[in-house]
Image (cartoon, helix red, strand yellow):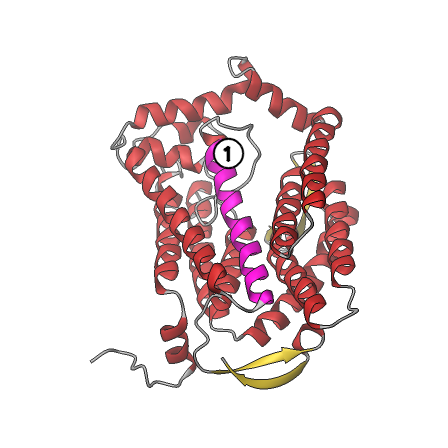
Amino acid sequence: MPVLSRADDSVVGRWWWSVDRVMLTALLLLVGLGYVLALAATPATNLSLNDPNTIVMIRQIVYLLTAGILMVGVSMLDLHYVKLAALATGVVFLVLTGFTLVHGVVVDGGRRWIALPGFTIQPSEFLKPALIIATAWLLAERRRTPGFPGMFAAIGLNSLVVLILLRQPDVGSTALVLATFFVQLFLDGLNTFFVGLGVAGFGAAGFAAFELIAHVHKRVMLFLHPTKDKAYQALTALSAFANGGLWGRGPGEGQVKHYLPDARADFVFAVAGEEFGMFLCLGIIALYAVIVLRGFMRVLRETDPFVALASAGLLTSFGLQAFINMASSLSMIPTKGMTLPFLSYGGSAVLATGLHMGFLLALTRRRIHAERVTDGLFGLGMQDRAV
């Protein structure tokens, strides 16, 4: 007899029989791998609370546990509450992201963090999934309500966020937001002419960033001339993959974590390759691929424009971020400083990914019961409908 019967009408019962359990399993495996790599990427420690490495490791484990709980909790929300949660998250973290321009903490030349007692937070990480859902609602509402300026509102909202990110500056997040927004516009039926115009504009913006932003110029030049002394991180990451071979040097036996200052974050994929080998790296790639491809298969079958656009945006952002991190670790593209979802160190990044994927799991659930669906601004007027 199953633990949860299909006749179980509780919140957990409805969730269990409607959530995409394959996607959920893949995500939980990533969380588990994040725990393993938190141990692997931490230099040898005596497990004393006076050891900074021990504190970093414990913090990451707590972040991962909290992110897993957050992801499962958010995935239980109905569509109405997904919209409300995204609205509340978006308003709060849009204000906080703007606040970084005035009182933000400067790290590596970027003013992206807010200092709180005992920790710092990067609010733009939490803003991104909320922005994707808000954009999807604006575009979908334009179809449902004649005369509703959803397209202009979506462009205005994304432009505001992009301007704030550029002022920090955070070129990577800016590019990710623009790419995701462009995919949502394309799926919403953007005219082919504007598709070409968008691609050209994206290329022009990249060239402008190369010419005008010093650290972008530096990273591109190091990518083009990898033998220069300053390309140390990229070359060291590549050597880690070579040293790991197929099966790896063994847990705790890697050396790259002792030499790369960003081993726990930007180059955690290289740590995985050195200690556990190429087979684990291929397994990590497979997990990301399963999540993205299975998600888009659901999008293709979706009849609700809001759900389709929101899910596609969340999948694009998640998949593109994973690709950029892994590709930069392999020196396929310039290093960007973008985290690998659930695997890289960082409280804001891990918790925001939990929220991000919780929204995705909620949106892709099979709505086989009567569910309260919504009218009006983010569903503040409601009606019942069987779905």
What residue is shown with label 1? 262
Q: Residue at x 74, y 29 (%)?
A: 208
Q: Residues within 10 Å of mark 1 (few under 14, many from 20)?
A: some
Residue toward you, 166 or 9:
9
Q: Is residue 382 left or right of residue 233?
A: right
- Expressed as whole percent of the image width and height from the top left, the position of residue 8 reads 34, 85
Q: Residue at x 24, y 33 (%)?
A: 247
Q: Does 223 appear above or below 310?
A: above
Q: Does 358 appear above or below 204?
A: below
Question: Hey, what amino acid is under mark 1?
Answer: Asp
Q: Over which residues does the magenta segment extend? A: 305-327
Q: Quadrant of residue 51?
A: top left
Q: Does 351 appear above or below 237?
A: below
Dot 1: element: loop
Report the magenta stretch's main SS.
helix
Q: Does 185 appear above or below 201?
A: below
